[in-house]
Image (cartoon, grey):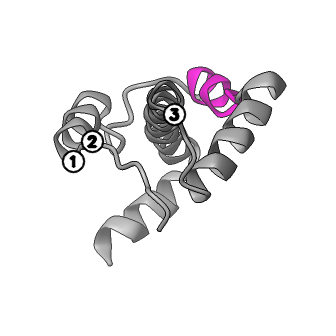
Amino acid sequence: MSRTSTIDSYETAILTRAIQPDNHNISATAARALLRIELHPHDRQRLHELLGKNQEDTLSAAERGEFESYLHVGMLVDLLQAKARAVLRPASRRAARRNG
């Protein structure tokens, strides 16, 4: 049976409150910069290796910690980029989305 790593729901809630993805308090320039954040090719390759080992349930304790670090960083980047996309979404689409 494959073990999967999950990010603590408390951590997710804390980061969401800190980042406030629906609060458009960053500039469009900053938003575009956030959308350019991506893993270095070396890290993408390493994450791919760890994902495979996780699916095979063969991660060592150290690898599990490394894998979870990638998940934490990924969640943080996802939240920041969600905020950036919301800032760059046209105001009319934001209003329509809020109203229904």
The residue identified by callout 3 is 60
Q: Position of residue 47 (x, y in %)?
A: 67, 37
Q: Which class describes the residues within 10 Å of circle 1: few (<14), some (14-19), or many (20+)?
A: few
Residue 48 quadrant: top right
Q: Residue at x 44, y 30 (%)?
A: 61
Tag of residue 42: none
Q: Describe the element under mark 1 as helix, strand or loop.
A: helix
Q: Which class describes the residues within 10 Å of circle 2: few (<14), some (14-19), or many (20+)?
A: some
Tag of residue 12: 2
Q: Residue at x 54, y 30 (%)?
A: 63
User: Which amino acid, mark 2?
Assistant: Thr
The alpha-carbon separation of the residues under discs 1 and 2 comes to: 5 Å
Q: Position of residue 53 (x, y in %)?
A: 64, 47
Residue situated in front as seen by the camera: 5 or 95: 5
Closer to the camera: disc 3 or disc 2?
3
User: Which amino acid, mark 3?
Assistant: Ser
Tag of residue 9: 1
User: Which amino acid, mark 1?
Assistant: Ser
Q: Describe the element under mark 3 as helix, strand or loop.
A: loop
Q: Earlier in the sequence, mark 3 or mark 1?
A: 1
Q: Which residues are magenta?
A: 29-38
Residue 97 versus residue 54 in the image, above or below = below
The alpha-carbon separation of the residues under discs 3 and 1 comes to: 24 Å
Q: Residue at x 50, y 40 (%)?
A: 87
**Residues marked 3 and 2 touching at CB (< 8 Å):** no
Q: Describe the element under mark 2 as helix, strand or loop.
A: helix
**Residues marked 1 and 2 touching at CB (< 8 Å):** yes
Q: Position of residue 20 (x, y in %)?
A: 29, 36
Residue situated in front as seen by the camera: 47 or 41: 47
Left-right relation of 51 to 80: right
* Quadrant placement of the C terminus: bottom left
The alpha-carbon separation of the residues under discs 3 and 2 comes to: 25 Å
